[in-house]
């Protein structure tokens, strides 16, 4: 809608709607330049991802020879088949799904009511409470005190370390609070009070049903955060059976390459290196796929979510 | 909105009782208590449900954010395994001195600044440019398509991102590696910073431009019409309408980002790091990790972390004050 379709020919006439309008030559040049740049941007963004996809289905000697460019060459699913025999992938996948779902549920259960309470203007302590939350965005105890705390709480090597410590993201709390402040009409609250609804009743019966968009956005933010979390596993967990997908990926994708971890993987050790590459491509796809699948469905909410968050900055 | 019309109708029907109930609750009526304890009682009687709603979040933050902050005193004390978080004997600024005299101190600080400033500046400029470009697309469908594509890499995890980089940079055969001969760029110390910020921009540029697109979509189209009639061309429209429209957003994001000037992401640096590029890639957060969890120098590591946080905070406050002065925009 902000598209400029016509510009005035003669700049010397300050304004005259009746002058025939068409694009200036300079506008054409700019149009074409913008189109070229955008095509280039889209290509740069999508091609690496596309390449991983086609390479995962291709004969690896063709990939190394540079023959795989647009479509798979020597189609096969060897990488996927081999990968699925690796128990680490399965346990990592299972763990990540459990941590992500439980974690996101807890996140929403904790964040949403708090955001609602903090959005009520008549609730006077909300300013100081908000300050208490906001401080944690800029100050933290850091790695070691957090580690010692987890140790004292007995959370090391436990699945709860993936779920409990990150229960509230202050950023998401602010986004949800701004949404409640700006998108839920205050009339509703007046009406609810008259109907004798308590705050609980108002929140569950009126506000939540109107908050599908923000639930989707915040839920997705949290879910992606859990799914892609590598740090927690690295710092707090060394029990292989409890490690989530990202840490397993690191073992398969990176440690094998740099040989820093000195782990031995029967899977990769037994196969030729070129097959190892194909497994890597497959692993990347399988690990990223769930997010890339759900995200287009939620995309329409993003702008809203980010925008609401921007209101309060 | 049907629901709100409904409730509004109810509101009208119950008007008299509405006033009554408000008076009964004491907002306007004379029942509002005068004593301090009375006020507190009144507050909790009225808002206990809101307190219950905010309490879980408060507990989690208290436990997992404030308790570690309390544990920061470890930076000034010797670590004592029996006492854990609170530490042993008080040693003042010893561990900070140790860090300042660490032979690697200057290099680590420099690396941290270099990597984070590059990614801060580039990660700030590119989304703005991309948003301005996307905003020029006339067709809604094309616009949506470009947005969908450019957001996508944001969902790729750091581990996968770094693995892709590794694969693409494989010497001779990699998608990019073939252009650099026998050299693996990840093993070249000088290439670390560019690799870091370029991949950062590739991954998050599209995502970070959403916020600018939202600001741009609220520009009054009449402004464009008026400018066109005054003979403005495309570039002038961008320069004089679009850019001022996103300016406040830019400033706020810049200030917020300044708060992370030394907060360069641990995961990505750590994963990209190897023995060859370490001279240019060792940053405060990776050093904290190595000192703390790999060498078990808990107090020393805490001191380094605290140093990092304080510098970040100083930057945030300075950036905020500057922006308040220059553009009347601030986050607090």
Image (spheres, helix red, strand yellow):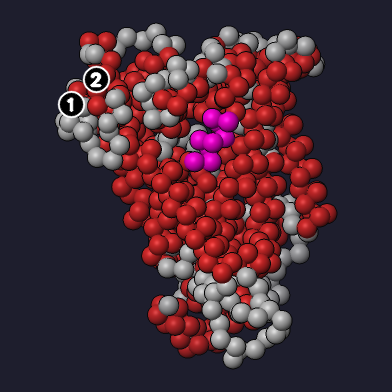
Q: Secondary structure at mark 2?
A: helix
In magenta stretch: residue B197: yes
In the image, residue B255 lies at what x, y percent?
70, 47
In the image, residue A196 lies at what x, y percent?
47, 72
Q: Give the numbered dot on residue A78.
A: 1
| Of B290 and A115, the residue lying toward us | B290
In magenta stretch: residue A56: no
**Residue B242, can we see it?**
no
Examine the image and state in which quarter residue B238 appears: bottom right
Which residues are drawn in magenta? B194-202
Residue at (65, 81) in percent of width and height: A10
| Of A13 and B160, the residue lying toward us | A13
Q: Mark 2 or mark 1: which comes first in sequence? A: 1
Which image quadrant: the C terminus of chain A? bottom right
Relative height, residue A216 to residue B184 (above, below) = below
**Circle 1: is it few (<14), some (14-19), or many (20+) Cα within 10 Å?**
some
Examine the image and state in which quarter residue A19 appears: bottom right
Mark 2 belongs to chain: A
Relative height, residue B78 to residue A160 (above, below) = above
Residue at (39, 16) in percent of width and height: A257
Q: Secondary structure at mark 1?
A: helix
In the image, residue B196 lies at what x, y percent?
55, 31
Q: Give the numbered dot on residue A275.
A: 2
**Circle 2: is it few (<14), some (14-19), or many (20+) Cα within 10 Å?**
some
Q: CA distance from mark 2 to mark 1?
A: 8 Å
Residue at (18, 26) in percent of width and height: A78
Residue at (59, 91) in percent of width and height: A18
Asked if the residue at tag 1 contacts the one at tag 2, i.e. Cβ–Cβ closer than 8 Å, the answer is: yes
| Of A72 and B34, the residue lying toward us | A72
């Amino acid at each position: 809608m902000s598209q400029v379709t016509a510009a005035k020919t003669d700049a010397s006439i300050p304004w005259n709607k009746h002058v025939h309008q068409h694009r200036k030559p300079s506008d054409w040049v700019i149009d074409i330049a913008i189109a070229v740049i955008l095509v280039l941007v889209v290509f740069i963004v999508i091609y690496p991802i596309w390449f991983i996809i086609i390479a995962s289905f291709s004969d690896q000697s063709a990939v190394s020879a540079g023959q795989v460019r647009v479509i798979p060459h020597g189609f096969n699913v060897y990488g996927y088949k081999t990968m699925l025999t690796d128990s680490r992938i399965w346990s990592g996948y299972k763990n990540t799904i459990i941590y992500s779902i439980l974690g996101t549920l807890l996140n929403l259960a904790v964040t949403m009511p708090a955001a609602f309470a903090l959005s009520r203007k008549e609730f006077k302590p909300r300013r100081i409470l908000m300050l208490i939350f906001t401080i944690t965005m800029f100050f933290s105890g850091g790695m070691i005190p957090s580690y010692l705390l987890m140790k004292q709480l007995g959370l090391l090597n436990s699945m709860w370390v993936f779920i409990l410590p990150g229960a509230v993201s202050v950023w998401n709390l602010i986004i949800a609070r701004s949404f409640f402040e700006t998108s839920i009409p205050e009339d509703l609250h007046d009406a609810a009070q008259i109907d004798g609804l308590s705050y609980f009743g108002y929140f569950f019966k009126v506000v939540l049903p109107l908050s599908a968009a923000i639930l989707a956005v915040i839920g997705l933010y949290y879910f992606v955060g859990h799914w892609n979390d590598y740090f927690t596993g690295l710092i707090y967990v060394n029990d292989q059976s409890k490690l989530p997908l990202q840490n397993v990926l690191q073992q398969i994708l990176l440690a094998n390459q740099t040989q820093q971890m000195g782990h031995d993987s029967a899977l990769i050790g037994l196969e030729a290196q070129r097959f190892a590459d194909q497994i890597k491509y497959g692993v990347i796809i399988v690990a990223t796929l769930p997010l890339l699948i759900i995200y287009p469905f939620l995309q329409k909410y993003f702008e809203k979510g980010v925008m609401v968050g921007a209101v309060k900055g | 909105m049907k629901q709100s019309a409904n409730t509004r109708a109810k509101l009208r029907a119950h008007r008299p009782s509405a006033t009554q109930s408000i008076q009964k609750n004491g907002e306007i009526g004379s029942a509002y208590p005068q004593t301090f304890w009375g006020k507190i009682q009144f507050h909790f009687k009225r808002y206990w449900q809101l307190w219950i709603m905010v309490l879980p979040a408060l507990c989690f933050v208290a436990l997992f954010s404030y308790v570690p902050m309390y544990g920061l005193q470890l930076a000034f004390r010797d670590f004592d395994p029996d006492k854990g978080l609170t530490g042993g004997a008080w040693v003042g600024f010893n561990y900070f001195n140790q860090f300042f005299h660490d032979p690697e101190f200057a290099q680590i600080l420099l690396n941290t600044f270099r990597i984070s400033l590059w990614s801060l500046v580039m990660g700030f400029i590119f989304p703005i440019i991309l948003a301005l470009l996307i905003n020029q697309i006339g067709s809604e469908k094309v616009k949506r398509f470009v947005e969908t594509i450019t957001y996508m890499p944001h969902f790729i995890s750091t581990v996968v991102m770094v693995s892709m980089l590794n694969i693409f940079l494989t010497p001779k055969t990699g998608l990019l590696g073939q252009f650099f001969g026998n050299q693996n760029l990840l093993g070249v110390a000088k290439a670390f910073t560019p690799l870091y910020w370029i991949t950062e921009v590739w991954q998050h540029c599209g995502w970070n431009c959403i916020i600018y697109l939202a600001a741009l979509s609220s520009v009054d189209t009449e402004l464009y019409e008026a400018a066109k009639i005054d003979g403005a061309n495309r570039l002038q429209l961008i320069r004089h309408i679009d850019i001022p429209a996103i300016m406040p957003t830019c400033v706020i994001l810049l200030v917020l980002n300044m708060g992370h000037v030394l907060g360069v992401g641990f995961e990505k640096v750590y994963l990209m790091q190897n023995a060859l590029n370490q001279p240019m890639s060792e940053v405060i957060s990776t050093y904290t990790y190595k000192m703390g969890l790999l060498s078990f120098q808990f107090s020393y590591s805490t001191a380094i972390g605290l140093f990092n946080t304080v510098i970040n905070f100083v930057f945030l406050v300075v950036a905020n004050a500057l922006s308040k002065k220059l553009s009347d925009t601030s986050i607090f």
